Amino acid sequence: MALHPIGLVPLVIAELPSLQGGSMTVGGYLPRGHVSYARVMNPMHDDDNQPLAWWTFAAEQSEVDATTKWTDLNDGEREVNPTIGTIEPTVAATLARLLRAHTSAPTECFFLVWEGYTGMRDDLRDTASITILPDREVLILAGDLADGAEPFDGMANGRSAQWWMPADGVWAVGNDLYGASVYISGTEELITDILAADDIEAYRATASMQIVSEEWAS
């Protein structure tokens, strides 16, 4: 794993807290002035470890979109829940592939990890940190974009970094420690590619849309 600690907070990350809004809108959470947004869901897995999309749990009269709550879909009849506080490994790998074509700095990316997670390598904890909305102290790691899909705890199917941002700031990826999905901002071309990918479940979001309340808590 090539993620490594850094000594100073990079500018693209340092300006993040001052740009974030006071409410948890998508545009306030990912405040880069980007034009397009998406919400990507972490899948569940069945007994054979096959991924299950959120829409498979929707009632016939329901339609999943960027505002959907997991609690509105899960009727409790099946003991499954999406992974929270990370980006599910297969989703992360797909995002890393798609995002790479939309930055001039794929080898210079920054990754934010909530400082409260256990299991991190000790050397990764000796790094710069910053506080972001909603009052989360996060550690800042650096590496190639592909490293964002790698578990920072070194375990198979372990947690990956919750926030990703390249040095050129052209897109941002954010997931809270309670999040069962991840929000992405960037160019329309990027979001179009994400929405068209057939191996992830993604829905178009807007800057003014509230982050789904069950996915964060102050």
Image: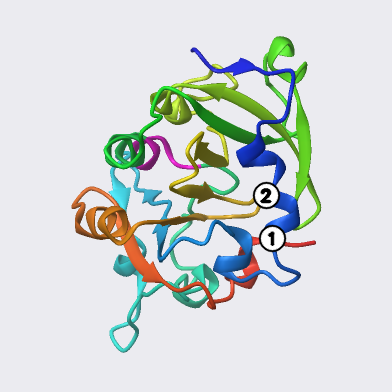
Kind of residue sitting beneath label 2: Leu
Rendered position, 18 above or below 62: above
Rendered position, 53 above or below 69: above
In this rendering, does residue 44 appear at all?
yes
Residues tagged 2 and 1 counted as in contact (Cβ below 8 A): yes
The residue positioned 69% from the left and 16% from the top of the image is 124
Identify the mark at residue 185; answer none if there is no mark.
none
Q: Which residue is mark 1?
A: 20
State left or right for residue 188 relative to residue 73.
left
The residue positioned 75% from the left and 55% from the top of the image is 18
Kind of residue sitting beneath label 1: Gln
The residue positioned 51% from the left and 33% from the top of the image is 167
Q: Which residues are magenta?
A: 87-92
Q: Which residue is mark 2?
A: 16
| Residue 175: in magenta span | no
Counting from the top left corner in percent of width and height, residue 115 is at 76, 33
Q: Secondary structure at mark 2?
A: helix
- Nearest to the observer: residue 209 or residue 36: 36
Mark 2 burial class by Cα count in 10 Å: few <14, some 14-19, many 20+: some
- Nearest to the observer: residue 149 or residue 20: 20
Q: Main secondary structure of the magenta part?
A: helix
Counting from the top left corner in percent of width and height, residue 94 is at 30, 39
What color scheme is it? rainbow
Counting from the top left corner in percent of width and height, residue 116 is at 78, 35
Counting from the top left corner in percent of width and height, residue 192 is at 24, 60
The picture quadrant where one finds residue 133 is: bottom right
